[in-house]
Amino acid sequence: MEDNIIVRTATAADVHYADTITNEMAESAKARGTGIARRSPEYVKMKMMEDKAVIAVTRDGGWVGFCYIESWEHEKFVANSGLIVAPAYRKSGVATEIKRKVFELSRKKYPNSKIFGLTTGLAVMKINSDLGYEPVTYSQLTTDEQFWKGCQSCVNYEILMSKGRENCMCTAMLFDPVESAKKQTELVPIVVTAEGSLELHKKREFQGNFKLFERWVKFKQFVLLKSWRKKQSENPSEKKNSFLSFLFFW
């Protein structure tokens, strides 16, 4: 990440970036051809004023990136949502730093909450994996209707509903603080480094197989889209199931 970029908790002084942020969210979703729950400038401003967002800016005040926090079911669940980076700064490491900062902010504000995310982006999934998230089924996420209503502005909303809200183009990932604490107490191998020092070393199984997971995600999205297009070409009143449409059903 460039030295002139600052990643920090957003404040009320940052509300003038709200229009730029929401416009870039919409343009990014359009360019990818995938979904993103649309948020208004007013909503983004509210998150800034509540200290529930992370923003990246240049030292001279240029906007670079953004992400915000939402809580659901009386703070049982927390979502880090709306990650967006300005086109000129993508693939520079900014997204990773924003996700790390918003994850730390979430853990500070909601230490007992499960943190989850829904995304179609493989880069975001890799960042989540490095932070300790694991892929889960949709049934392990919040049941709060307000959260799912936020998907209505997504281009893939009809796919979500056609699957009974149990699967969609997005992949669900979850960080469970209880499970994470258990893993921290597990015995791990001791590795002697080249310098002769001792280190505790443990590579999580999911992280080690991310390439395989990446191929699975692409195939899942292909199957879902193919299934949806087929249904669109058929009589809407007919409910036909195919083996492939449920092969990777979460």
Image: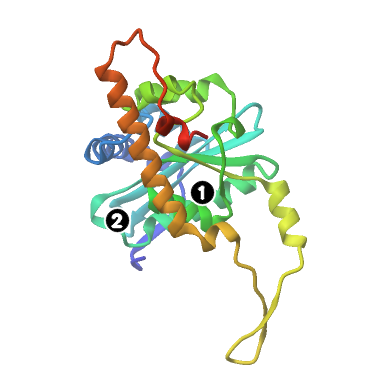
Q: Residue at horizontal 36%, vertical 36%? A: 223
N-terminal label among 2 and 1: 2
Quadrant of the snapshot with the N terminus? bottom left
Give whichever of 68, 136 is nearer the camera. 136
Q: Which quadrant of the view contains residue 95?
A: bottom left
Query: Along the horizontal axis of the image, is 158 left or right of 108?
Result: left
- Residue 243 position within the rendered picture, expressed as x and y whole percent measured from the top left: 43, 30
Q: Is there any visible trace of residue 120 in the rendered image?
A: no
Query: Is 80 situated above or below 214?
Result: above
Give whichever of 116, 170 is nearer the camera. 170
The residue at which mark 1 appears reads as 102
- Residue 144 position within the rendered picture, expressed as x and y whole percent measured from the top left: 58, 23
Query: Is 148 situated above or below 177?
Result: above
Dot 1: within a 10 Å radius of its alpha carbon, few (fewer than 14), some, or many (20 or more) residues? many
Count of numbered circles in the view: 2
Q: Residue at horizontal 32%, vertical 32%? A: 225
Secondary structure of the residue carrying tag 1 is helix
Question: Which residue type does callout 2 highlight?
Answer: Arg
- Residue 83 position within the rendered picture, expressed as x and y whole percent measured from the top left: 40, 44
The residue at which mark 2 appears reads as 90
Q: Which quadrant of the view contains residue 192?
A: bottom right
Q: Residue 157 carries which label?
A: none
Question: Which residue type does callout 1 highlight?
Answer: Val
Query: Along the horizontal axis of the image, is 147 left or right of 120?
Result: right
Query: Along the horizontal axis of the image, is 194 left or right of 91?
Result: right
